[in-house]
């Protein structure tokens, strides 16, 4: 399987600009579009569209580069972690690393706040629609604000 940089014919690197990626996408799209007289290459066009979606922003390129760096590596900046990649597949390992490099104490306080809020709601009125709504609201708050405590992927 080729990566998104390969599909667009780009060298994997942080120095690419949005314009570089857009130009590569247009070049590949023009050569492979299914509406071409020769029929193009619909499969390659779909791959290129997906690659452009991933790489069109600096943040997207940083995520792809981080995934490429993390692929096949059982080490992190603190040294080897035996078997981590077997225990935490792909995305979970990435999230664990982002927590570790981010603000883990602040994230833990947020999680404990959600647990306490949910526990108080259930203890106060039992499992009723109001307590379920409070728990759902607390989890939504965690999902919306917890990302600020994670390190960037670049």
Image (spheres, rainbow, N blue to C red):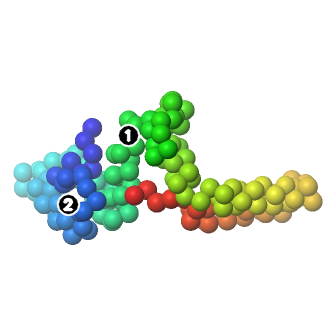
Q: Residue at x 83, y 63 (%)?
A: 130
Dot 1 alpha-carbon crowd within 10 angstroms: few under 14, some 14 to 19, many 20 or more: few
Q: Quadrant of the C terminus?
A: bottom left
Q: Residue 90 placed where, x, y %?
A: 46, 41
Residue nearest the observer in this picture, 77 or 47: 77
Sequence-earlier tag: 2 or 1: 2
Up-down: is 71 above or below 97?
above
Q: Residue 29 placed where, x, y %?
A: 17, 58
Q: Residue 98 placed where, x, y %?
A: 51, 53
In terms of secondary structure, where does tag 1 sit? loop
Residue nearest the observer in this picture, 54 or 65: 65
**Could you tell whether 134 is left or right of 14 in the image?**
right
Q: Residue at x 46, y 60 (%)?
A: 152
Q: Residue 34 placed where, x, y %?
A: 17, 54
| Residue, far left | 38
Q: Please name the residue that numbered disc 1 is placed on.
A: 71
The reply to whether residue 2 is visible in this rendering is yes
Q: Please name the residue that numbered disc 2 is placed on.
A: 25
**Could you tell whether 14 is left or right of 123 in the image?**
left
Q: Residue at x 81, y 58 (%)?
A: 116
């Amino acid at each position: 399987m080729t990566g998104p940089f390969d599909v667009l014919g780009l060298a994997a690197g942080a120095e690419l600009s949005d314009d570089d990626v857009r130009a590569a996408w247009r070049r590949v799209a023009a050569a492979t579009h299914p509406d071409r007289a020769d029929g193009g290459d619909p499969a390659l066009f779909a791959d290129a569209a997906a690659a452009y979606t991933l790489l069109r922003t600096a943040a997207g390129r940083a995520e792809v580069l981080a995934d490429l760096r993390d692929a096949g590596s059982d080490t992190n900046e603190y040294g080897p972690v035996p078997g981590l990649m077997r225990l935490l597949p792909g995305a979970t390992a990435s999230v664990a690393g982002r927590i570790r490099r981010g603000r883990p104490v602040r994230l833990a306080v947020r999680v404990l706040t959600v647990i306490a809020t949910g526990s108080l709601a259930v203890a106060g009125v039992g499992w009723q629609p109001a307590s379920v709504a409070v728990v759902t609201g607390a989890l939504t708050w965690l999902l919306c604000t917890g990302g600020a405590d994670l390190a960037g992927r670049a």
